[in-house]
Image (cartoon, rainbow, N blue to C red):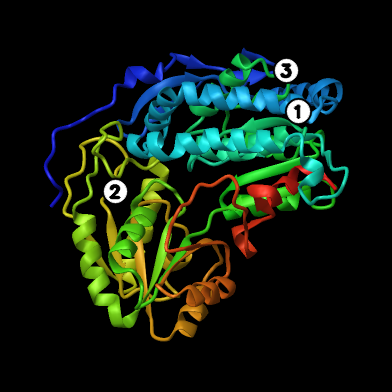
C-alpha cells in the first residue's frame, strides 16, 4: 500500500491564474473571434480559466504578422542579436519557473514535482542551448551559408505542453524564422504565458504568435499557404492528414507522432535501476506510453518487483509534492485508456491494478500492469498515454528485436543491460527514433531524436535538429 505522509501541497496562488486568457498576435494580447471557451483543471474537473479561442480569420492575421516580422526585422537581424533575445527569454523562464511549474501542473494534471524539477529546467535549457547556435549556424554542418525558411507554423499536443513548445519555438527563432504556435485546446495556458515572457523580453512584434483554439484552428494553420514550414506534434492519424495536406506544396514538414516507447530488459540488466526506470517511464507524466519486453528468465521476478514498487506510488492531487501519479489530461483520454485496458483483459491479458485509493473527482486512473500480453493485442500496438504498462516476454535477444520490430515503430526505446556491446547491438536494430541506454525520458536539448516509420518525420533537437528550420 502507499506510504502514509502528510499532504505537502504547493499553493495554486503561485500560478497567478488569470480569469481569462487571450491569443497573442503581432506583439499584443487580443480577443480571438472564435467564440467563448474554457480550459479545466483535470484533477478537479473544474473550470480553471476562460480562453478566447482563435478563428480562421485570426490564423490569417497571425501569419501576416509573422511574415512582416520575418521580412522587416527577424531575418535581417544578426544571429548574435537574435541570441540576446533568446537569452532574455531563458532567464525570464528561470525567474518565473515556480509560477510556470504550478500553472503547468494545474492545466495538465502532471505532478508538481516533475513540472518543477524536470520540465521547467528543460524548458529554459532549450532557449539557452539554441541561443548559443544563433550566431554559429554556418558551423552546424548544414552548409556554409544556411538561411532561415521563413514563417513556421507549429501545432503541439497536450503532452509536456511547455517542454514541447520550447523545443519547437527555440530552434525556429534561433535559425531566424518567425513562429505561429497553436497549443493543444486542453493545455493552452503555459504557451500563452510563454508569449507574455517573450513580450517582457521585448521580442519584436510578430516574431512569436500564439493561437489557442480547437482542432480546426490547428488544421487551418497547418494548411495555410503563407507558411514555409510546419511542425506537428500529436497523434499519428492527424499527422498523416497534415502530411497529405502539405504533399506537393513545397512546404517543409516535421512530424513527432504518437507511438509507444519500447523498453527491452535483458536478463543481465541492473535490476533495481531497471525497476525504477520502468516505473518512471511507464507511470510518469512523459506521456509517451510504454510497452515492455522482458527476458523470460527474469520475467516473474521483475513483475513481482514492479507490483511492489507500483503499489507504493501515490496517486492524487498534482499540486501535492508527495504525488507520484497525477491526473490524465481529459475525460476523452480516460475513456479511451479504459476501453483499451478492457479489450486487453478480454483478449486474455492478466491485469494487475494498484490497490490505491483514487480521488473522488478528476480524471484519475490507477496504475495498472498487464502480463501475458501478445504482439497482436491492441494494448501492445497502440499508444497508451496513461499509467498502464503492457508486458511481453522473449527468449533470445534476437527474439526481442523481432518482437519489437513486429509492432508499430516506437518513438523511443530503452535498452536495459550491463553489457555495452549488447546496448549497441540492440539500439542499432530496434526500430525507434531514439534509444536510451539504462535510462528513460532524457530531456536534453543537445541530443537529436527523430521519428521512425509512423512515429514521425524529421529530426528534433541538437545540431541535427536545426536543419528542420534552415534552407540548406
Graded by Cα atoms within 10 Å as few (under 14), some (14 to 19) or many (20 or more), the crowding at tag 1 reads: some
Q: Judge from the rendering whether residue 178 lies leftward or rightward of residue 269; answer left or right.
A: right
Mark 3 vs mark 2: which is more N-terminal?
3
Residue 365 got which mark?
Answer: 2
Which residue appears at 31% of the width and 41% of the height? 326
Q: Judge from the rendering whether residue 188 lies leftward or rightward of residue 153; answer left or right.
A: left
Graded by Cα atoms within 10 Å as few (under 14), some (14 to 19) or many (20 or more), the crowding at tag 3 reads: some
Mark 1 vs mark 3: which is more N-terminal?
1
Q: Judge from the rendering whether residue 46 lies leftward or rightward of residue 65; answer left or right.
A: left
Residue 80 got which mark?
Answer: 1
**How far separated are the C-alphas under marks 1 and 3?**
15 Å
**How far separated are the C-alphas under marks 2 and 1?**
48 Å
Is disc 3 in contact with disc 2, using a CB cutoff of under 8 Å? no
Whether residue 30 is situated above or below residue 39 in the rendered picture = above
Graded by Cα atoms within 10 Å as few (under 14), some (14 to 19) or many (20 or more), the crowding at tag 2 reads: many
Residue 406 appears in view:
no
* Residue nearest the viewer, comparing 270 with 192: 270
Residue at the extreme right of the image, as rendered: 145
* Residue nearest the viewer, comparing 215 with 358: 358
Whether residue 351 is situated above or below residue 163 in the rendered picture = below
Disc 1 element: helix
Which residue appears at 13% of the width and 38% of the height? 5
Q: Which image quadrant for residue 196?
A: top right
**In front of the other: label 3 or label 2?**
3
Whether residue 173 is situated above or below residue 386 in the rendered picture = above
Residue 179 appears in view:
yes
Give coordinates of residue 18: x percent, y percent.
44, 14
Give coordinates of residue 454: x percent, y percent.
61, 62
Give coordinates of residue 316: x percent, y percent.
24, 39
**In front of the other: label 1 or label 3?**
1
* Residue at which label 3 appears: 204
Amino acid at each position: 500500500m502507499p506510504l502514509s505522509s502528510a499532504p505537502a501541497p504547493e499553493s495554486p496562488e503561485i500560478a497567478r491564474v488569470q480569469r481569462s486568457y487571450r491569443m497573442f498576435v503581432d506583439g499584443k494580447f487580443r480577443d480571438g473571434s472564435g467564440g467563448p471557451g474554457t480550459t479545466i483543471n483535470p484533477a478537479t474537473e473544474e473550470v480553471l480559466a476562460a480562453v478566447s479561442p482563435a478563428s480562421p480569420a485570426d490564423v490569417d492575421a497571425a501569419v501576416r504578422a509573422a511574415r512582416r516580422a520575418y521580412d522587416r526585422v527577424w531575418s535581417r537581424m544578426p544571429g548574435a542579436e537574435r541570441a540576446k533575445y533568446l537569452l532574455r527569454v531563458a532567464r525570464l523562464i528561470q525567474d518565473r519557473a515556480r509560477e510556470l511549474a504550478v500553472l503547468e501542473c494545474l492545466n495538465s494534471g502532471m505532478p508538481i514535482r516533475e513540472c518543477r524539477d524536470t520540465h521547467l529546467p528543460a524548458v529554459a535549457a532549450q532557449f539557452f542551448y539554441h541561443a548559443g547556435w544563433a550566431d554559429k549556424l554556418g558551423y552546424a554542418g548544414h552548409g556554409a551559408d544556411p538561411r532561415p525558411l521563413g514563417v513556421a507554423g507549429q501545432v503541439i499536443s497536450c503532452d509536456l505542453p511547455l517542454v514541447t513548445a520550447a523545443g519547437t519555438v527555440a530552434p525556429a527563432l534561433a535559425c531566424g524564422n518567425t513562429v505561429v504556435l497553436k497549443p493543444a485546446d486542453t493545455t493552452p495556458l503555459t504557451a500563452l504565458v510563454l508569449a507574455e515572457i517573450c513580450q517582457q523580453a521585448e521580442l519584436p512584434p510578430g516574431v512569436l504568435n500564439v493561437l489557442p483554439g480547437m482542432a480546426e484552428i490547428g488544421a487551418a494553420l497547418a494548411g495555410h499557404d503563407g507558411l514555409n514550414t510546419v511542425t506537428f506534434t500529436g497523434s499519428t492519424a492527424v499527422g498523416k492528414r497534415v502530411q497529405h495536406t502539405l504533399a506537393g506544396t513545397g512546404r517543409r514538414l516535421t512530424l513527432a507522432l504518437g507511438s509507444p516507447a519500447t523498453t527491452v530488459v535483458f536478463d543481465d540488466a541492473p535490476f533495481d535501476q531497471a525497476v525504477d526506470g520502468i516505473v518512471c517511464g511507464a507511470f510518469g507524466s512523459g506521456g509517451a506510453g510504454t510497452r515492455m519486453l522482458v527476458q523470460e528468465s527474469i520475467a516473474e521476478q521483475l513483475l513481482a518487483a514492479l507490483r511492489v514498487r507500483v503499489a507504493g506510488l501515490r496517486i492524487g492531487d498534482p499540486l501535492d509534492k508527495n504525488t507520484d501519479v497525477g491526473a490524465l489530461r481529459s475525460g476523452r483520454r480516460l475513456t479511451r485508456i479504459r476501453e483499451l485496458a478492457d479489450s486487453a483483459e478480454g483478449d486474455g491479458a492478466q491485469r494487475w491494478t494498484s490497490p490505491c485509493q483514487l480521488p473522488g473527482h478528476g480524471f484519475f486512473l490507477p496504475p495498472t500492469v498487464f502480463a501475458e500480453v501478445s504482439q497482436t493485442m491492441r494494448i501492445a500496438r497502440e499508444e497508451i498515454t496513461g499509467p498502464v504498462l503492457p508486458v511481453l516476454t522473449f527468449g533470445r535477444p534476437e527474439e526481442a528485436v523481432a518482437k519489437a520490430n513486429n509492432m508499430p515503430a516506437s518513438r523511443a526505446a530503452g535498452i536495459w543491460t550491463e553489457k555495452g556491446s549488447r546496448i549497441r547491438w540492440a539500439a542499432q536494430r530496434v526500430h525507434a527514433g531514439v534509444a536510451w541506454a539504462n535510462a528513460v525520458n532524457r530531456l536534453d536539448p543537445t541530443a537529436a531524436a527523430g521519428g521512425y516509420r509512423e512515429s514521425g518525420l524529421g529530426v528534433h533537437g541538437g545540431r541535427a535538429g536545426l536543419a528542420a528550420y534552415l534552407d540548406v
